[in-house]
């Protein structure tokens, strides 16, 4: 419970109560806080498995695309650390089920240090820090500094509104000084879909945060100040083609707000956690799963992120991706061992088979989808 | 209930090949080429298709291109403006015939 005490003290110092609208827009509440059955990963997996689908076997689908033995790891490039589930927002589609109520599941200093030791044992070139709102973790800057010192490319997956928390006013400058890439969530360059997915007021706050990032040099073509916008569909449909949309987003954000950015990536929503609940409530689950399986793109398989990424949870467990992490599907070595970040063996990990289930169709539909955008 | 329009018929569109596979193949090839990214973006073409769907009042097309417009990154406001373009042309097309009416009235009236 030391961690909890620390988080509570940390929150008290932020200058705003994260549970309020002032702390961050709220579109939903966490499944966990409502104690609904779908909060449990097993219930989510069972819900997906119960959908009648003509071609709902992921392993069979990838076998048809030339991956008969299942998915095997490629070279490890991305070390993705989910530093905690605490967030100042509660977006409707959140696959993490994050929110201001997730106080206990946040990485402590000892686990951060274990991550750094594990990182040193791999050749990963990029550390991708996600959450929750990763900036809310008291050890966020310690982790960033340690990764930058090691010469790693660092990504901060930022919800933008957290940059308006009073205590974090210096964050854009802090990130810019260290060459951290900021990958921020913005479902649409216009207001309607942004607020519909992330909560009223999100758009306006996001625009203010983007201005601050532009002011410190982000989004102007400098590779050490890279500003990436990340769009998820605000509904039960697939992500748009990022290459086709980028120009329009550029013109729209420039004309309406004078904002510039470096690149746009588009991701499909994963049918788990709060997005899964939304699909069920809207009666759209079967249609969405059909959409994903019908849009299965064989060319998107080779580039799925689980092949070049290792995902680490707040408590130091290892996963093939952040989605498997939320579904409690840990990495599994031949023989059944499930190592943690404390006993990570990079060579042994390369021998594993990636754990898959029906949610994986989210990454192979359409243009393909990953934390880096399209894969096909 | 039997109806003239059934949503389940839309995914069966390809079955029109049954009576003449060659023409169907040509049609679908041409159709796909029409919607490819070109001098207009795929998103712009999708909004045009959505507007025309309303003008020709094709329920299949409205379903298909509402979904397509969303997947191409359009939002409700943009889709609504496209729909109003179709409605304005339809309304205007009626009204502009009023000149013919006026001509008739002026020619035959006092």
Image (spheres, helix red, strand yellow):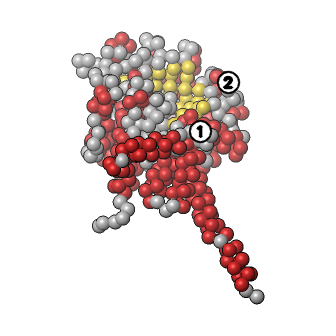
Packing grade of label 1 (10 A; few <14, some 14-19, many >=20) is few
> Callout 1: residue from which chain?
B
Could you tell me if residue A2 is visible in this image? no
Above-or-below relation of B95 to A138: below
Above-or-below relation of A121 to B54: above
Do the residues at discs 2 and 1 belong to one chain? no
Name the one closer to the observer, B4 or A312. Answer: B4
> Callout 2: residue from which chain?
A
Residue B34: horizontal and vertical position, in percent? 53, 43
Residue A35: horizontal and vertical position, in percent? 34, 48
Q: Residue at x 47, y 18 (%)?
A: A77
Residue A25: horizontal and vertical position, in percent? 55, 48
Q: Residue at x 62, y 40 (%)?
A: B39
Contact between marks 2 and 1 (CB within 8 A): the answer is no
Q: Which residue is mark 1?
A: B38
Cα–Cα gap, marks 2 and 1: 30 Å
Q: Is residue A320 left or right of residue A205?
A: left
Q: Farthest residue toward the left?
A: A335
Mark in the foreground, 2 or 1: 1
User: In this figure, what is the number of numbered marks?
Assistant: 2
Residue A155: horizontal and vertical position, in percent? 55, 26
Q: Is residue B2 left or right of residue A303?
A: left
Packing grade of label 2 (10 A; few <14, some 14-19, many >=20) is few
Above-or-below relation of B42 to A343: below
Q: Which residue is mark 2?
A: A222
Say what secondary structure mark 1 lies in. loop
Say what secondary structure mark 2 lies in. loop
Q: Residue at x 69, y 79 (%)?
A: B104
Q: Identify the mark at residue B62; answer none if there is no mark.
A: none
The N terminus of chain A lies in quadrant: top left
Q: Farthest residue toward the right?
A: B110
Q: Residue at x 63, y 37 (%)?
A: A247
């Amino acid at each position: 419970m030391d961690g909890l005490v620390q988080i509570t003290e940390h929150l008290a110092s932020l200058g705003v109560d994260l549970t309020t609208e002032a702390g961050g827009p709220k579109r939903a509440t966490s499944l966990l806080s409502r104690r609904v059955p779908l909060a449990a990963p097993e219930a989510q997996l069972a819900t997906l498995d119960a959908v009648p689908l003509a071609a709902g076997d992921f392993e069979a689908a990838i076998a048809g695309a030339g991956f008969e033995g299942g998915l095997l790891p490629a070279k490890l490039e991305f070390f993705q650390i989910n530093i905690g589930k605490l967030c100042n927002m509660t977006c409707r589609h959140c696959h993490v089920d994050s929110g201001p109520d997730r106080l206990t599941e946040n990485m402590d200093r000892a686990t951060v240090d274990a991550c750094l030791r594990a990182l040193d044992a791999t050749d990963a070139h990029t550390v991708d820090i996600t959450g929750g709102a990763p900036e809310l973790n008291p050890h966020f800057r310690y982790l960033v500094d340690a990764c930058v010192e090691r010469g790693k490319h660092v990504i901060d997956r930022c919800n933008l509104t957290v940059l308006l928390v009073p205590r974090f006013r210096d964050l854009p400058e802090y990130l810019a000084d260290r060459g951290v890439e900021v990958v921020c969530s913005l479902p649409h360059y216009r207001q309607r879909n942004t607020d519909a997915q992330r909560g009223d007021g999100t758009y306006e706050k996001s625009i203010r945060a983007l201005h601050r990032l532009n002011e410190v040099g982000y989004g102007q073509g400098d590779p050490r100040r890279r500003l990436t916008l990340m769009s998820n569909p605000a509904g039960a449909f697939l992500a748009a083609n990022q290459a086709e949309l980028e120009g329009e987003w550029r013109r729209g954000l420039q004309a309406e707000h004078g904002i510039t950015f470096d690149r746009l990536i588009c991701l499909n929503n994963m049918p788990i956690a709060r997005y899964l609940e939304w699909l069920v409530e809207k009666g759209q689950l079967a249609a969405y799963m059909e959409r994903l399986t019908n849009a299965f793109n064989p060319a998107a398989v080779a580039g799925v992120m689980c092949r070049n990424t290792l995902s680490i949870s707040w408590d130091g467990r290892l996963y093939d991706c952040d989605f498997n992490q939320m579904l409690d599907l840990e990495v599994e070595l031949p023989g059944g061992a499930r190592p943690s970040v404390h006993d990570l063996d990079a060579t042994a990990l390369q021998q594993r088979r990636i754990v898959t289930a029906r949610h994986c169709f989210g990454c192979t539909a359409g243009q393909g989808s990953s934390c880096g955008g399209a894969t096909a | 209930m039997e109806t003239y329009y059934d949503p389940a018929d839309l995914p069966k569109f390809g079955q029109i090949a049954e009576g003449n596979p060659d023409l169907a193949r040509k049609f679908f090839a041409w159709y796909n080429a029409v919607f490819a990214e070109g001098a207009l973006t795929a998103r712009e073409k999708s909004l045009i298709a959505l507007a025309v769907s309303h003008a020709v009042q094709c329920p299949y097309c409205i379903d298909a291109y509402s979904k397509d417009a969303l997947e191409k990154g359009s939002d409700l406001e943009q889709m609504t403006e496209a729909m109003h373009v179709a409605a304005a042309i339809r309304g205007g097309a009626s009204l502009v015939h009023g000149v013919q009416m006026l001509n008739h009235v002026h020619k035959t009236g006092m």
